[in-house]
Image: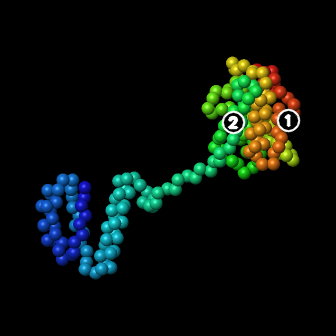
Amino acid sequence: MTLHIIVPVKQLAEAKSRLAPVLAMIPGITSMVVIPFSGNIQARAMELSLLLIFDYLVFCHHAEKNIFDIFPSLPKLDLRESRNIYIPANDGKSLLKEARRIEVPEEKEKFAALIFRIVSRGSIYENTSGAVPIDTHVRAIWLKGDTCYIDAGLAMLRDGTPVIPGSEDNFRTALEKSIVENVPSINRVVLLEKGVPLKRLWEVAAGRD
């Protein structure tokens, strides 16, 4: 460790001769820098400021720290909101109510599409993969009055996943309940398959398997 000592200019030589043998007996001190200063108060303040700046630069160099990173970075704000989402259960009849922290989009269509994906993926606490045995996605979504139309596409039945009786109706109920409770002004959800209403997604997926 290097020790910095500030002494008046007139006492520079005397300070070096007196301090050297004393500092040699102190463990951890490997070197000494004696910095002289003048008798002028303003000059002393400038010299002290330069010394502190120099020490800060040395610290930044050894700590691999940006010299302009003086203040700690602000923590990232958590913009997520707690919302209730309904997940279809494996019995094909009941719904699981789960509180999810969601970053809510401003556009209603994007929020409804996000809820569709969450409900399709199932519970984060239980294995409910059998409740939604297909892999699908939102092709398009639009609002008309108080009705939300979701056009789903590429419904594919997952290998080895049995179709539970009543699971599709339960999925539609969970989807509508989740969207209606979370997206303002929407009171009804209509699910389509490639633009065609009243199609049964599970049957379409089984036909493609």
Q: Which residue is mark 1?
A: 195
Which residue occupies the foreground of this view, 61 or 197?
Answer: 197
Q: Which residue is mark 2?
A: 97
- Real-space CA distance between mark 1 and mark 2, rounded to the nearest whole angstrom: 30 Å
Residue 31 at x, y = what percent?
A: 21, 58
From the image, which quarter does the N terminus lie in?
bottom left
Q: Earlier in the sequence, mark 1 or mark 2?
A: 2
In this picture, residue 4 sits left or right of residue 14 = right
Which residue occupies the foreground of this view, 209 or 173?
Answer: 173
Q: Is residue 183 above or below residue 133?
A: below
Residue 154 at x, y = what percent?
A: 77, 30
Q: Tell me which amino acid carries mark 1.
A: Gly
Q: Residues within 10 Å of mark 1 (few under 14, many from 20)?
A: some
Judged from this view, the residue extending furthest toward the bottom is 40
Q: Residues within 10 Å of mark 2 (few under 14, many from 20)?
A: some
Indicate the secondary structure of the residue bearing disc 2: strand
Q: Which residue is drawn at the image coordinates 77% and 38% (left, top)? A: 177
Question: Can you tell which of label 1 and label 2 is closer to the viewer?
Answer: 2
Residue 18 at x, y = what percent?
A: 13, 67
Quarter of the view holding residue 99:
top right
Q: Is residue 134 above or below residue 83?
A: above
Q: Which residue is drawn at the image coordinates 25% and 74% (left, top)? A: 37
Quarter of the view holding residue 19:
bottom left
In this picture, residue 197 sits left or right of residue 5 = right
Which residue occupies the foreground of this view, 200 or 42?
Answer: 200
Q: Tell me which amino acid carries mark 2.
A: Lys
Indicate the secondary structure of the residue bearing disc 1: loop
